[in-house]
Image (cartoon, grey):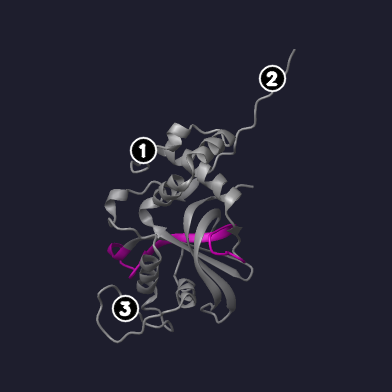
Amino acid sequence: MAVIRRKPKPPLRYFLYVSDAKLDMLFEQIDPAQRRRISAEVKVDLKVASMTLRQAEHTAARTAKLRVVERYIDAHHQVGTPAEPGSEFFRGQLVMQWGWLARSAHPDDSMPVVFFRGRDGADVVSLAGSRSHVLGENPEGHAMFGFSSAPSIVAAIRAHVSDLEGVPKHRWWGEEGDRPISMTIRDHVSQAAWVRLDTPPQLLEFLAVPLGDGEIELPDGEAVHGVLGTPLYVAHARP
């Protein structure tokens, strides 16, 4: 009796966050001939991958587009690590905590920003993006402008840590006063290390765009290498 050998299928991935805005932007920049070749390699329907991602129900389009974009990035771009993120993209697998940035403990004072942070030895990675890209969230219930840009992320981190003891005070949007404003990327990366998270840690994997990195000081005084980025995706880590 002949044994039927099934072709191995790609493992299932449990995504927490996928930035449709970044996917659309990157996918449209890939040459059509490259799209056809890559879609054949990763076995996705190019028509499905080419669909718009503006509607939350387009799960198949999101998954297909992500596989094409991720394969293209791995083949044609420098992909760094938490230790050396580079200037284009970096990926990693870390035990991370995550949650929403907020200006206070009051539930109505949260901001439409999701924040992930993890550590691998001397490397501390902080990732932030729009809360609307967390799978299962209602994109209509949050601000209509992007919260994955560097200025928005920096402003949200400033607001979150502005009342913590020992952290320089920073102005929130439109706030008057004489509070100093950090001007260097290292200042912003350092502030991300002060964000308070009380959620349980999870082993996660990510592909992200680095916004800056440098030596920073943790709240306990330890000197480490910090990275601040915005993710293309965050998922439960696979073995």
Is 58 drawn above or below residue 236 in the view shown? above
- Quadrant of res 123: bottom right
The vertical placement of 194 against 72, above or below, is below
In the rendering, which numbered label is found on residue 57? 1
Whether residue 94 is situated above or below residue 11 in the rendered picture: below
Residue 124 part of the magenta segment: no
Q: Tell me if mark 3 has few (under 14), some (14-19) or many (20+) residues whose alpha carbon lies within 10 angstroms of its own.
A: some
Q: Nearer the viewer, residue 80 or 75?
A: 75
Label 1 SS: loop
Q: Is residue 98 magenta?
A: yes
Give how far across and how far down residue 158 sits, in percent. Answer: 38, 74
* Residue drawn where x is 50% and y is 59% of the image: 209
Left or right: residue 119 versus residue 188 is right
Instruction: Return the mark for residue 171.
Output: 3
What is the span of residues highlighted in magenta in the rendered image?
84-110
Q: Which residue is mark 2?
A: 4
Q: In the rendering, at what x and y percent does residue 53 appear?
A: 37, 42
Amino acid type at image mark 3:
Arg
Query: Can you give x and y, in whole percent of width and height, for residue 8 in the image?
Result: 64, 32
Quick check: marks 2 and 3 in contact, CB under 8 Å?
Answer: no
* Residue 77 drawn at (x, y percent): 57, 54
Residue shown at the point (30%, 66%) measured from the top left: 106
Name the amino acid type tagged 1.
Glu
Lower sequence index among marks 2 and 3? 2
Label 3 sits on a secondary structure element that is loop
Looking at the image, the residue that sits furthest to the right is 1
Task: Return the disc, 1 or 3, that comes first in the chain's sequence.
Answer: 1
Q: Is residue 81 left or right of residue 169?
A: right
Residue sitting farthest toward the bottom: 178
